[in-house]
Image (cartoon, rainbow, N blue to C red):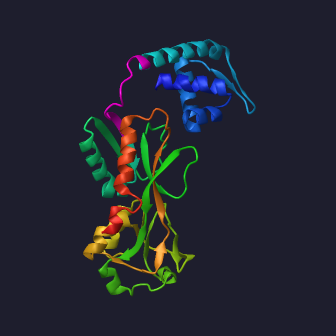
Amino acid sequence: MDRLAAMQVFVSVVDSGSQSAAAEQLDLSRPAVSRYLAELEAWAGARLLHRTTRKLSLTDAGQEMLPRCRQLLALSSEMQAAVAAPASVPRGLLRITASSSFGHAQLALAVADYVARYPEVAIDLLLLDRAVNLVDERIDLAIRITNELDPNLIARPLSVCRSVVCAAPAYLARQPAPRQVAELAHHNCLTHSYVGKSLWQFEQHGEATAVAVRGNLSANDATALMQATLAGLGVALLPSYLVAPRLQSGELVALLPDARPRDLRIYAIYTSRKHMPAALRTLLDFLAERFGAEPAWDRI
């Protein structure tokens, strides 16, 4: 636990009168504020605040703790001022998470290039196909592909994630390619467990349309679906960041050129802008420039 940060949160909650106000003041998420308070109370071995739906008040232990926290924070500020220097070279450890498919296809190489530029930064890259709690799992940065953001977290747009309906030539040799979106209902559609599992959404001729799909394989990883598609098992809706080279080589064939699958956004998610370390700040800038509004994989 960062005890100074926890003390700053405690003091801010007391001064502002609520956890929500403290979160806004410190530019933290509300869950992060709650986590800091809980960890400070666990370290102190006593409850510091009485929490009710109407107000917060100090316990006896909180009354004892508050002035000492103020003293330590003041001393910390004095020490920082005494050794203040120009912005330092990025250094330290960053814990980053992303989906397995995006991590393997795009993020790992980007991170390698970043570390080559800033060799004093170490990266712990966690590729997981599940939602990660940034506070509980001590994650500095999550790369998420979604159109539904958690309002408790801070999101920086990095790029766009487009998708392609595609199949292998071997599958198309057995089944005529669909000419209309509705015809997908008659194909063996390989689906993602969390994204469009039973309903694929498109924009066609300026209007939204959707089709219910089904098939004999579902997976929580886009790379696994791509491998099954390459094997000729069926039709899949796959991200262009993953399949662009396969489309270029002819191993996969793009279908329904007049129907555009719904775009998703690629975001960098983190918990606070306050006192952002140089490593995280420079990594965010690096990834935003690297991926861009029109990502390189869509220009292949």
Which one is in front, 270 or 243?
270
Q: In the orientation shown, which residue stands out farthest toward the right?
A: 54
Query: Relative to residue 81, is residue 215 depicted above or below?
Result: below
Q: Main secondary structure of the magenta part?
A: loop
Name the residue rendered at 49%, 22% in the picture: 4
Name the residue rendered at 55%, 77% in the picture: 206
Give the image location of residue 260, x and y in percent: 47, 74
Which one is in front, 185 or 30?
30
Locate residue 96: give its quadrant: top left
Name the residue rendered at 42%, 80% in the picture: 257
Which one is in front, 166 or 141?
141
Which stretch is magenta? 81-95
Give the image location of residue 272, x and y in percent: 50, 38
Query: Relative to residue 213, is residue 27 depicted above or below?
Result: above
Query: Relative to residue 164, is residue 135 depicted above or below?
Result: above
Name the residue rendered at 42%, 43% in the picture: 141
Locate residue 216: give its quadrant: bottom left
Residue 87 lies within the magenta run: yes
Give the image location of residue 262, x and y in percent: 50, 69
Residue 51 lies within the magenta run: no
Which one is in front, 140 or 132?
140
Q: Is residue 236 visible?
A: no
Left or right placement of residue 42 versus residue 54 in this view: left
